[in-house]
Image: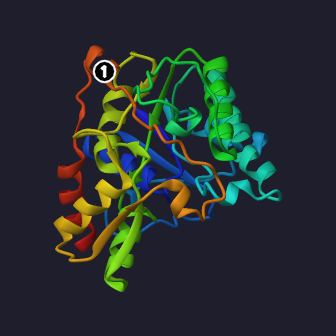
Amino acid sequence: MKVLVTGVAGQLGHDVMNELAKRGYEGIGSDIAPVYSGIADGSAVCSMPYVAMDITDAESVESIICGVKPDVVVHCAAWTAVDLAEDEDKVDKVRAINAGGTKNIAEVCKTLDCKMVYISTDYVFDGQGETPWEPDCKDYKPLNVYGQTKLEGELAVSGTLDKYFIVRIAWVFGLNGKNFIKTMLTVGQKYDTVRVVCDQIGTPTYTLDLSRLLVDMIETDKYGYYHATNEGGYISWYDFTVEIFRQAGYTTKVVPVTTEEYGLSKAARPFNSRLNKDKLTANGFDRLPTWQDAVARYLKEIEG
C-alpha cells in the first residue's frame, strides 16, 4: 500500500509516517516547505520520500498526487492557529488551506479512486450542553473561523468522495510541534502558580496513538465519520494540567478559572468537546489508551 501523507512537518503527519514505516507500507511525506522541515529525530519520517506541495494550488496538487499515484491520502495539513485565524487579514488564507486545499485533494482522490483520510475537529460543533457529540451528528454550528473552515473541509470531502474517513480529534499533543503539554511544562517551570480554564470539557489526543488507529482504518473499507481521542474520561484543561504537573513532578499550583475569567482568547472556544467514540468499537477498531497513560509515555518521549 502506497500512502501520501500531507502535513508531515506537524505532530500527526510525523507519527503517521513512522507508523506506516513500522508496518512496511510505502509512505510519501508532503508539506509546503521545499524539504522536510520537521523535527530531526532520526525516525523513519526523516529518511522517507518527501514532495513539496502547496495544497492551495489546485494544478500542483493534481500534478503531484497523480504523479505519486497513492492508494490512500492521509490529509493532516491544516491551518491550526485558532486565535490567529480570527484576524481579518488571515481569514481568506485559512479558508484557502482548510477548505480549498482539502477540496483540491479530494478532487484528485476522486480521479484516482483512492481512499482519503481527513483530520477534523470538535470545533465544528457549538460546544453547548453536556451530551457527547455523535460522529454522524450534522448539527454543525462552529463558533470560530477555524471550526467553520474545518467544517467546510469536511463537507468538501464527504460531498466529493465515497471512500473517505473523516476523523474528528481534540486537544492534540505530539512530538513534532507546539502543544498544550509543552506550553504548560514551560509555564510551570517559570511560575509558582498558573491559572487554567476549568469549564471547557473534552479529552486529549496523543498523535502517536492516533496514528496507529488511522493506519488501522486505511487497512479497511469501513468508511465514514469517526471520533477519536484517548480514553480515560472527560476532563477540563484544569484537570489536564494538574495531571501533567503531577506526572512531571512539578509543585506548581494550578488555579481553576472560568473561560470568562481567563479572557485573552480572540476565538470563542466550545465548552462541550465531549466526543462519543462508540462507533470505533462498533466497527472493530481498537480505542486509544487512556490519556493519563498517554501523558506518561509522552513525557518520556520528549525527555528523549
Q: Quadrant of the C terminus?
A: bottom left
Q: Is residue 250 above or below residue 202?
A: below
Query: In the picture shown, does residue 295 fall above or below 127?
Result: below
* Residue 216 in picture, x, y percent from top left: 30, 30
Say which quadrant the N terminus sits in: top left
Q: Nearer the viewer, residue 282 or 87?
A: 87
Whole-percent x and y of residue 194?
Answer: 38, 73
Can residue 216 be seen in the rendering of this structure?
yes
Nearer to us in this view, 263 or 206: 263
Query: Residue drawn 52% across and 35% down?
Result: 127
Q: Circle 1 sits on which residue?
A: 278
Q: Is residue 176 left or right of residue 114?
A: left
Quarter assignment of residue 11: bottom left
- The secondary structure type at the circle numbered 1 is helix
Q: Is residue 47 visible?
A: no
- Above or below, comparing residue 198 to residue 264 in the picture: above
At label 1, counting other C-alpha atoms closer than 10 Å, the crowd grade (few under 14, some 14-19, many 20 or more) is some
Disc 1 residue type (three-letter): Asp
Question: x, y (%) of residue 91?
Answer: 78, 51
Q: Total number of numbered labels?
A: 1
Query: What residue do we see at 40% from left, 16% from top?
Result: 221
- Percent x, y for residue 66? 64, 34
List the single residue furthest toward the bottom: 190
x 61%, y 29%: residue: 154
Image point (48%, 47%), residue name: 28
